[in-house]
Amino acid sequence: MSSALTDLHRYPIVQAPMAGGASCPQLAATVSEAGGLGFLAAGYKTPEAMYEEIKQLRGLTDRPFGINLFMPQPPNPDPAAVAAYGERLVGEAAWYETSLGDPDSGSDDAYDAKLAVLLDNPVPVVSFTFGCPTRAVLDALAKVGTRTVVTVTSPVEAQTAQWAGADAVCVQGVEAGGHQGTYSNDPAADGMGVGLGLLSLITLVREYVQIPIIAAGGMMRGSQIAAALAAGAVAAQLGTAFLVCPESGANALHKQAMTDPLFGRTELTRAFSGRPARGLVNRFMREHGPYAPAAYPQLHHMTSGLRKAAAKAGDPQGMALWAGQGHRLARELPAARLVETLAVELDAARGALGFQPQRGAVS
């Protein structure tokens, strides 16, 4: 496998870009300084806000980092279904004393404007979620020295990314917290049992592509990273593990819920955004998830105010508590300490299996 990405950071540990505030400059800088690859999330931000976060991050570290973009989404095929879902949420709006957002607030997440910023002010790595950029986009980023990663959930998606010219793919297993990065938003694939586990998916993708694989999906320990590397990945991307770090910008209620016995399991749901996303099962998910249409980002815009109002009211039952399947293993460690701990665990696991220690691993 190419070292196109692994030569950017000491350990094969990538901090996932978590949209919504968790992946702030402080977290990304700390992870990069500790030897991992920190990431910012540009999703739901304006191009100006994205640029300001990049400036902040560069003021905190001179180490490489990445930024994640959401791909533009096709028009909603069923406005009536969106309107009907809005009717369901009228009571929620009244309860939290807020109003529902406008579902037609935009579907491209200012993609072109953000790309323009990143071409004028290049960053080391740019990753993409919810689709694959064109070859022209990936070639333009390559010309300014940026390495590119495309999130995939199937071998066919991985092959598409390779054909388009991506430097690597982030292979996302069904265990992953937050949104599934599928190219399509197909309700026919919504069943709770649909989706490939990470290790099986890595093995399948290796049969289809030759570019490096970053593994993502529910990993919380160094031994799990070792398993992903043994299956063929060059690095592991962890989100939930970093969400509870003090440097994370996630809401305190969200952090507390990770290990709260009240939230014992996760499910994939469209309830909050209109796209399948894994989160802790709460009241909102149970009551509205079965009725949520496949309409992203329309439902995201509609429920944004509700989620903020629930957080302000101190009510996690109305929040989107994104979490991977391993959430109960969360450790409230400073981000640098977590990177070091994961590296030690990885080294120990590889040693137990008879592998040589990772380049730069702690011993």
Image (cartoon, rainbow, N blue to C red):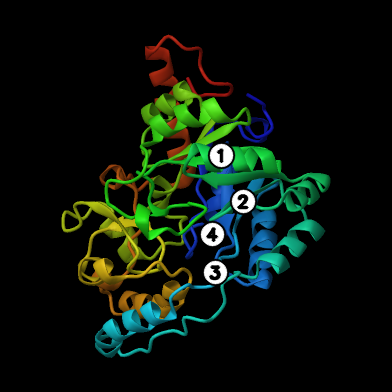
Residue indicated by mark 1: 158
Q: Amino acid at mark 2?
A: Cys
Residue indicated by mark 2: 132
Q: Amino acid at mark 4?
A: Cys
Q: Can residue 232 be seen from the camera position used here?
A: yes
Q: Give the CA separation, mark 3 to mark 1.
A: 25 Å
Q: Give the CA separation, mark 2 to mark 1.
A: 9 Å
Q: Report the number of discs.
A: 4
Q: Secondary structure at mark 2?
A: loop
Q: Can residue 34 be seen from the camera position used here?
A: no
Rendered image: mark on residue 24: 4
Rendered residue at 70%/61% (across/down): 55
Rendered image: mark on residue 44: 3
Q: Give the CA separation, mark 3 to mark 2.
A: 18 Å
Closer to viewer: mark 3 or mark 2: 2
Residue 187: image quadrant is bottom left
In the picture, which quadrant includes the N terminus? top right
Of mark 3 and mark 2, the one earlier in the sequence is 3
Rendered residue at 47%/85% (across/down): 102
Is 9 left, or right, of 194 in this rendering?
Answer: right
Q: Is residue 237 above or below residue 279?
A: above
Rendered residue at 47%/44% (across/down): 153
